[in-house]
Image (tube, coloured by chain):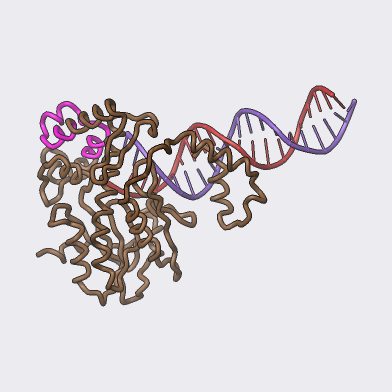
Chain colours: A brown, B red, C purple
Amino acid sequence: ENNNYVSFWDYKFNSQKNLNDYIPLLKHYEYIKEYMDKNNFNEKFENSKYDYVTKILYSIEKNGLLKNNKLVYTQYNNFTSTGRPSNRFGGINFAALNKTDGSRKPYVSRFGDKGKLVEFDYDAYHLRLIADVLDYDLPTTSVHEHFAEQYGVTYSESKMLSFKYLYGGVPYDIGKSIEFFGKVKEFVKKLWKFYRTNKYIESYIYRKKIYSNNMNEMNRDKLFNYFIQNLETERNMEVLNNLLPRIEKYESKLILYSYDSFLFDFNIGDDLEYLQTIKSILEQNGKFPVKVSWGNNYHEMQDITEKFAV
DNA sequence: GCTCGCCGGGCTAGTAACTA
DNA sequence: TAGTTACTAGCCCGGCGAGC
């Protein structure tokens, strides 16, 4: 938000009571008025799906993560402009935990030597999501290797190029030579045309309307980014809505949701059956393959995907 | 009552993390 | 290409006291 006093107080004095003793009421008025003026509140909010989105995110929040012998909690905000929940609490942005500098090391299992942290990561998630929308068959093996062969480059270069094409636009020659990106290009074009004509688009699963009068400086690639992040979030919520009731009876807990990955605090007593149930539901009959890793802490995770090979 | 200068809050822009 | 949160630097400007 533009009114910086809110973020300032939240950052410096988030536990301070009686804020009205310090902040004039008119400052609150300025903040709320500015927000109301900028946003369209005329549309009635009728999408009941969001009731369970809130419940799902709460069911993750309440489990907490064990850090330095005490539980720390996260807080999800699912009303972001992209629809993708942000996640922070107590000065930590959990979606931005550094992977290499040891920031993740203090997070361990609450079950001690009878527990492990287990992470399920979707392989090339956005590429597979959009392939599903386009009804295009991608291989169940590594997507980035598949495109590396078509581009004639290495695995890491292929990953970089696919991201570039997906979010920065598909070049003419790539659209012509690689069928998948040709279809992506066509889809992005149609989506943009619909948005320009109708002044909104709908999210793919919940049919939530995204209105142009609530968006700043929209362009074709940005719109596609919004569409795909909404798709990712809505599909994840559908999957979690299916998964959570099935794993309620176990001791293990889902403790962190990071867009294409799900972190569980696994009690070894729950056995392989628990992990196989999760993998199977996340993958949806192998349509969205996941990689599995585990470790004694969130920094030192080891790939164990092969242990699940049939 | 006017001017000047200090102080500190308001605000913007930017960086660094991470995600796809 | 898009997003979020945490945090910092530095400029701008208004409040206020001192001095005349």
Is residue A44 part of the magenta span, yes or no?
no
**Direction from residue B8 to residue A183 in the image, left or right:** left
Please say if A193 is above or below A40. Answer: above
In front: A59, or A167? A59
The residue at 56%/46% (across/down) is A8
Q: Position of residue A285 (x, y in %)?
A: 12, 57
**Direction from residue A136 to residue C18 in the image, left or right:** right
Please say if A163 is above or below A272. Answer: above
Q: Which residues are magenta?
A: A161-185
Q: Quadrant of the C terminus of chain A?
A: bottom left
Please say if A34 is above or below A125. Answer: above
Q: Position of residue A180 (x, y in %)?
A: 13, 37
In front: A53, or A159? A53
The residue at 21%/39% (across/down) is A162
Q: Position of residue A155 (x, y in %)?
A: 18, 45
The residue at 35%/70% (across/down) is A109
In front: A124, or B11? B11
Is residue A178 part of the magenta span, yes or no?
yes
Please say if A279 is above or below A163. Answer: below
Q: Position of residue A23 (x, y in %)?
A: 64, 46
**Occupied quadrant, residue A187:** top left
The main secondary structure of the magenta stretch is helix
